Image: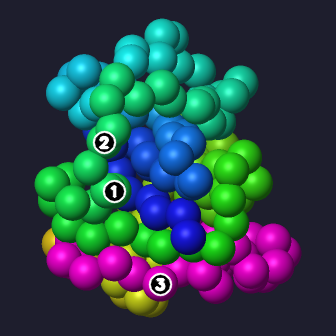
Amino acid sequence: MARVTRLSGALLAESNGEYFLIGNTKSPCDWAAAGFEHPGELDPLKHPYIRLSPLRPPPPLGEGRGGGALTMNLEGEPLAQALAQRFLIERNGSVSERLWRLVLHRGDADAEGIPDADIDARWLGEIPAPLWQIVRDTVLRCL
């Protein structure tokens, strides 16, 4: 089962011992303190996700990172691709906070805080792309 959490504003996914950074970091990241080699220049508009190399075995995602994690059935690059399609804003490669909160808080895109427990998000990998596009368009529509 894959786990997904946040790292410096981007998504951090772990799948079978592989780690992926999805999206643009929104704040400086101390890569060594996070347990990863510096990935170099990030350009999420060209490459929406990259594979990270751990410096040491990182703690399970969610633990020590400010809360729980999403759990998903997808693995490897298909997981990273799906997360990019589900959460990234195409014009800048950043993670949509409203879409993230919608999933994290089970339908409430305006909720605050981070749940302590893991959130079962298997449905997110199974929802058809056209249906999720309707959700995206509705949530990201300017109010």
- Could you tell whether 55 is left or right of 93 in the image? left
Residue 58 is labelled as: 2
Q: Amino acid at mark 1?
A: Leu
Kind of residue at disc 2? Pro
User: Which of the labelled discs sits on residue 61, or is there none?
Assistant: 1
Q: Which residues are magenta?
A: 114-143
- The answer to which image quadrant residue 138 occupies is bottom right
Kindly indicate the quadrant of the structure image that contains residue 112.
Answer: bottom left
Mark 1 vs mark 3: which is more N-terminal? 1
Between 45 and 18, which is closer to the camera in this rendering? 18
Contact, mark 2 vs mark 1 (Cβ under 8 Å): yes
Q: Does 9 sit above or below residue 35?
A: below
- In terms of secondary structure, where does tag 3 sit? strand
Q: Residues within 10 Å of mark 1 (few under 14, many from 20)?
A: many
Q: Which mark is residue 120?
A: 3
Query: Which residue is at 47% across, 17% downward?
Result: 39
- Residue at 50 percent of width and 29 percent of height: 52
Horizontally, is 123 left or right of 6 in the view? Answer: right
Q: Is residue 57 visible?
A: yes
The local secondary structure at tag 2 comes to: loop
3D distance between C-alphas at marks 2 and 1: 8 Å
Q: Residue at x 29, y 23 (%)?
A: 31
Q: Is residue 128 left or right of residue 91?
A: right
**Looking at the image, is mark 2 or mark 3 earlier in the sequence?**
2
Query: Within the image, what quadrant is residue 82 found in?
Result: bottom right
